[in-house]
Amino acid sequence: MNNDPKLLVVAPVSVRWGDMDAFGHVNNSVFATYLEEARLRWFATIEGGWYDASAAPVVAAQSFNFRQPIEWPADIQIELFVNRMGNSSMTIGHRIVDSQDATRIHCDGSITMVWIDTRSGRPVPLPQALRDAVADATRA
């Protein structure tokens, strides 16, 4: 039986020279930018919207397990999958892998996002369009 998570999106990224730090590899802070880009690419595919003027997601927590450095030049893939769906939050798992060899993992971890009322800052239920998109991805 295959226990691999169902992917929400696989986002290709070409590493830029400016992503590098003084040690010749991608700076750890850039990993968060890569993940943000992948999430936004997935969100952009959701029909019916994932936010509006009254409710939007915020990052509540994120974790990174740095496995192997990424050196320039490189083409990588960001894989996103759902670890957990709650009432007002979801935890998205991630892996950053080499685009030619997905067994070469540069980073893995997760990010928890909470949908909040933009006026009060209080949690609100996840948008139905988001739930539907996750259900579609996990059925595939």
Image: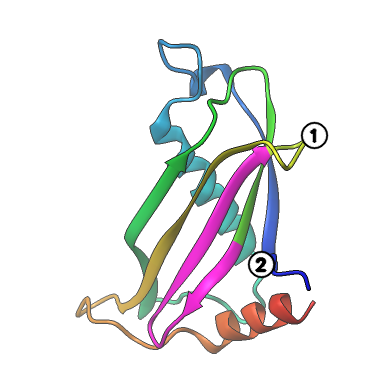
What residue is at 68 percent from the left and 49 percent from the top? 11
| Residue 71 image position (x, y, % from top left) | 59, 19
Q: Which image quarter is the N terminus in?
A: bottom right
| Residue 21 image position (x, y, % from top left) | 43, 16
- Give the camera-side residue of 21 and 5: 5
- Give the camera-side residue of 42 and 104: 104
The three-letter amino acid code for the residue at tag 1 is Gln
| Residue 45 image position (x, y, % from top left) | 68, 67
User: In the image, 114: left or right of 67?
Assistant: left
Q: Is residue 83 magenta?
A: yes
Which quadrant would residue 16 be assigned to in this image? top right
Identify whether 31 is placed above or below 43.
Answer: above
Q: Earlier in the sequence, mark 2 or mark 1?
A: 2
Dot label at residue 5: 2
The three-letter amino acid code for the residue at tag 2 is Pro
Q: Is residue 94 magenta?
A: yes
Identify whether 61 is placed above or below 95.
Answer: below
What residue is at 71 percent from the left and 75 percent from the top? 137
Marks 2 and 1, Cα distance to the nearest angstrom? 20 Å
> Which stretch appears magenta?
81-97
Which quadrant would residue 124 be assigned to in this image? bottom left
- Give the camera-side residue of 68 and 12: 68
Magenta part mainly helix, strand or loop? strand
